[in-house]
Amino acid sequence: MDDKIIEFATLLRENGLRVSLAENMDGFHAVELIGLGDRIAFKDALRATIIKRAIDASTFDELFDLYFSGLGEMVKGSASSLMGAMQLDDAAFQRLLDSLAQILNDLDAELSELAQALLNNNTGQLEKMLRNAAAAAQLQNIQRSFQEGRYAHNMAQTLGLGGLAQELDALKQQLGEADIDPQLREQLQRFIDRRLQDLTDMIKRAVRMELEKRDHSVRENQRLQSLAEKSFYYLSEEEIRRMKEAVAKLAQRLKNVVSIRRRKAKRGKFDLQDTLRKNLQYGGVPFKIQFDRRVRDKPQVMVLCDVSDSVRNVSRFMLQFVYSLQDLYSRVRSFIFVSEVGEITQLFEEQEINEAIEQSLTGGIINVFAHSDFGRAFRNFHRDYIAAVNNKTTVIILGDARNNYNLPHEWVLKEMRQRAKQLIWLNPENRLTWGFGDSEMDRYVPYCDIVEECRNLNQLYRVIDRLVR
Amino acid sequence: MPSTDGRFASIEDVIARFGQQKYICSRRIATVVYLANHLEKPILVEGPAGVGKTELAKVLASSLGHELIRLQCYEGLDEAKALYEWEYAKQLLYTQILKDKISEVLGGAQTLTEAVDRIAMEDDVFFSDRFILPRPLLQAISAEQPIVLLIDEIDKSDTEFEAFLLEVLSDFQVSVPELGTLRARHIPLVVLTSNNAREMSDALKRRCLHLYIDFPPASQELEIVRLKVPGISETLAQEVVNVVQRIRQVDLKKTPSISETLDWAKALTLLNADRLDEQMVNDTLNTVLKYEGDIRKAQDELKDYLQKQKAKLQGPAGVESDKDLLH
């Protein structure tokens, strides 16, 4: 059993779960204690010892079923489908098996182990033989589907399928000559033919199952990884949903990092007054030293998001990110623009994040179907909100600066820069294309403290991380 | 009946004994508890708030007849508050009171060095068990009897503390520089709970058995309600559980937990309700849901359900709507 657990753990690792040696050992001890009699308890024991994250549980469940019962279930399933094909119920099938055993006994037929297991429908034995054959054929090395045929062939050879076919042919011959009821004889011969066919099927299915095990969540993992590098431009609905989760997770991670950073930065200079006060209870003997607590400025953030068609996805994740991290900032104000500016801060206070984002992106606040006009949007911003920008504010502008050849009005940025603590521009376009066509990026860049390309999740994370430092 | 050697005989034994403590647990929970008990490993319990993680530890302690020592984690929790602290004030007080005795000891000393040497010979007195203030972890390790140690909301603590905990959890020993290494007499049964505010380190997870408790299925929740709210009528219990299970499907800020189901059931029995109607639900929904927005959403969701229930009650006309309900 230990071997099987080790192999199972390897399988889990191949599917991207972390299983350490210590956990493996725990698995052994647990199984020793629980025993193998109770399947559910066995599964729970393995789960508790080997799986340590709730999200891994579903992968574990699937692989457990595939690994520990896949083959057995298949062997049993093959017998029951045979019953169905021969139009026999349980009892009749059992009678057939019994009479066959009786006849074999009478005929004194010498059958190989495999033939016996097959004809007696000894599922346990069959499963074991299939497993051994799989191990001998090194089935665990299978990687691609085009290899299926080769591995199936190897397994058949190890099992001795050729010999078995001859053996069963001979048996059929013997049955033909024996003195039995012709109807039964015909049924038995059909049964033998079917069983041989079943075995070839079983081999094929075993190979297919092995391939599924390897394949299962390797692809899943690759997809998640590539998601972080995938450009926001080309996201499907499904990917947007997954991306939302990824953003939420990243935001949580960032929160943790920041809280540690803050804590480390907490200790300042020696504080004489506080030390004296704290140590009065010890008669003025300074047992406990007190330090200044450095108060860190929480940044104030103003986000201006372009929500025209081309950059809507980036804006979505940007907003989600900023609002997931709200408590790291003292104040967040957010605006969206296409050719006019609208404030959506209020919306976020009243609604749940995702809903607020959906509402602001679908045209509840401003006309999102207009042509981008950065210049006009900036002028409007200057008219209505410039007073809110002060020396504690970090202004983040998110947009591709594709201005449809309108006036750029870069003087607004100049003034914003003078008032604000810093001005950051995130552009979801590739850096190489900035300044070409109707892109006004070159005009805006000189007034920004930081200009970053922000095309995928990793880049977005890096930018936000810099923000809260 | 507490066992003599502090071990569960089997998984069924766990379920039975927890049942006596009025804690209904699934087989999975029982399996993990049984394993932890026999393998002497800590259990890391994760899951949403209010599914009975902390309760599990309490019940575990009482069903084994052990004492429960609880360490509540929070941000900034450090060794001094978790393990031990020297009682400076007491030490100072003693030195003050014993001033005369000390000068007596120092009486014949000729030089400063000699005086310091003499004091040094006595310093064991001041760093002994007498002046140590044991905090939960040290209490757990030095306990005479086997105990259950509950480390609650470990995710609220800092990563440094988590690292420190590793030593305690793997060897069940701590070193106090002045006293030497203290080793546990009995390996305590440790339960760590986490709300998943942050991911725990792999090193900690490796040392623990992992248990994820989710909201129970309707049948189990019904059993819990019947057990914990004795006076409740069967129909009401059923309806409360149905409604709560339904609410959990809605996308809410805070999904109602088991304890909130129980609160609601208790509130309804107190109001002498024997079945749910819309008025009653609207008046008491605030025991289950804690946000205005959530309550509004749930009311919308439940309106249909309650009307159909009502129609069903009103006799033959209700047959059709009964069908609708099945969809």
Image: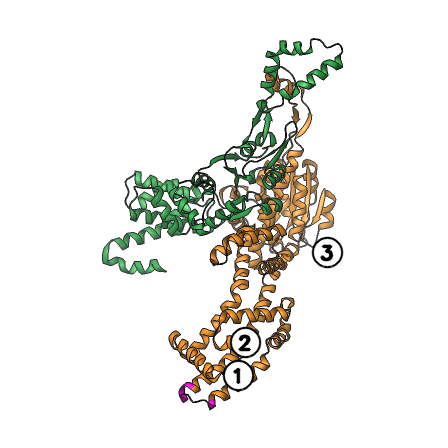
Chain colours: A orange, B green
Q: Quadrant location of residue A135?
A: bottom right
Q: Quadrant location of residue A255?
A: top right
Q: Where residue B35 sits in the image (x, y, percent)?
A: 51, 48
Tell me if residue B276 can be seen.
no
Q: Residue at x 66, y 20 (%)?
A: B123
The amino acid pointed to by label 3 is Thr
* Mark drawn on residue A114: 2
A178 drawn magenta:
yes
Q: Quadrant location of residue A258?
A: top right
Q: Residue at x 53, y 62 (%)?
A: A68
Residues at discs 3 and 2 both on one chain: yes
The amino acid pointed to by label 2 is Leu
Please give left or right for residue A421 compared with residue B305 in the image.
right
Query: Tag 2, which chain?
Result: A
Please give left or right for residue B273 compared with residue B256 in the image.
left
Location of the N terminus of chain A by quadrant is bottom right
Q: Nearer the viewer, mark 3 or mark 2?
A: 2
Instruction: Classify 10 Å Cα crowding around label 1: few (below 14), some (14-19), many (20 and above).
Output: some
What is the magenta range? A176-184
Q: Which numbered disc flags the more N-terminal residue, 1 or 3?
A: 1
Mark 1 residue element:
helix
Query: Tag 1, which chain?
Result: A
Q: Mark 3 points at which residue?
A: A433
Q: Which numbered disc flags the more N-terminal residue, 2 or 1?
A: 2
Residues at discs 1 and 3 both on one chain: yes
Q: Name the residue under label 1.
A: A168
